[in-house]
Image (cartoon, rainbow, N blue to C red):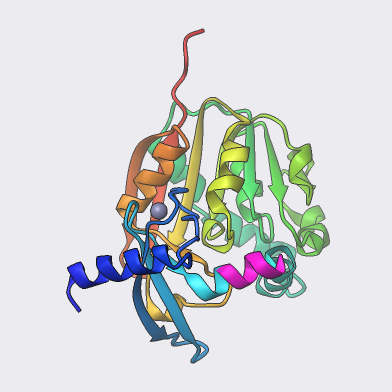
Amino acid sequence: MSSIDIVEKSITLRSNGRDSLTCPCCGTESFMVPREKCIGTLDGRIYNLWTCLFCTAIINRDDIEASIRENSSISDQAESSHHFYDSSCLDESKIKKYIEGDQRIDFLIANYPEVPRGVFLDFGAGQGFAASSATKYFEKSIAFEISVENIFRIHHMLPNKDRVEITNDISEIEGFDVLFAFHVLEHIPDMLVVISNLIRRLNPGGALFFQVPLFRRDYLTRTHYTFMNSYACERLCEKLDLVVKGVWFDHDQDFITCIACQAVRNT
Ligand SMILES: [Zn+2]
């Protein structure tokens, strides 16, 4: 099927009222075209993948629509996070070793040294390691996680624990200087809406620092809704009114990392 055929097919679908999904990455409506149906390597399921013609993100269409229809993403993520970030096997020496070896915040500072050093928000904090390691540079960290049991269990062992707050209530978080979201955005069905609401609370000069998986068949899971690439990251940041500082690729694991900052406005 040629590209022209695919575009024509998408027009037909739109006219049938089926192409109603808003792109979770760029917020564009009615611009989705079918890409392929393929089998996920991990679970053997068939995934119905579509592409946004505006931002080029790949959308796991059936699962994102089921999540929206059943309003199940929060419970699904809580369960998935609870198991994935199980902290019951961690002791103080393992935690210390992991956090000392965590170079993610050093990477942010190296590439955006001007970032204000007040509050660091670890969004989707898992075990809270990034929140803890960020206290090397920032006055305070907030670890937001839907399933907070894993962080509470090890909080007393986290370096600089007195400067690491834990919450599962996003509404109570006010201004912050960094929104850190590693392997989180792809799990949010209405990603642009959620991130836009957070970016409104980003302090002037603050940064969005995120990493997501690129599209690979072995990264297909029921709760990975969106696969971004370099162009899609730029369109997302554009929608958020952020300036992209850089985009990097992890070639071993096929991850993409982006740092974008909020322009300081003269009022
Ligand atoms: Zn899009």
Q: Is residue 214 magenta?
A: no
Is 246 on the left-hand or right-hand side of 136? left
- From this view, report whether residue 30 is shown above or below residue 254: above
Q: Is residue 67 magenta?
A: yes
Residue at 71% from the left image edge and 75% from the top image edge: 83
Residue at 38% from the left image edge and 38% from the top image edge: 111
Q: Nearer the viewer, residue 157 or 260?
A: 260
Where does residue 72 sit, x and y in percent of width and height? 71, 68
- From this view, report whether residue 112 is shown above or below residue 38: above
- From this view, report whether residue 188 is shown above or below residue 235: below
Where does residue 218 sit, x and y in percent of width and height? 43, 81
Where does residue 229 sit, x and y in percent of width and height? 34, 58
Q: Is residue 96 visible?
A: yes
Q: Residue furthest top?
A: 267
Residue at 50% from the left image edge and 89% from the top image edge: 45
Residue at 46% from the left image edge and 55% from the top image edge: 23
- From this view, report whether residue 189 is shown above or below residue 194: below
Q: Nearer the viewer, residue 22 or 73?
A: 22
Q: Nearer the viewer, residue 262 or 38?
A: 38
**Residue stretch in magenta:** 65-71
| Quadrant, the N terminus | bottom left
Q: Residue furthest bottom?
A: 44
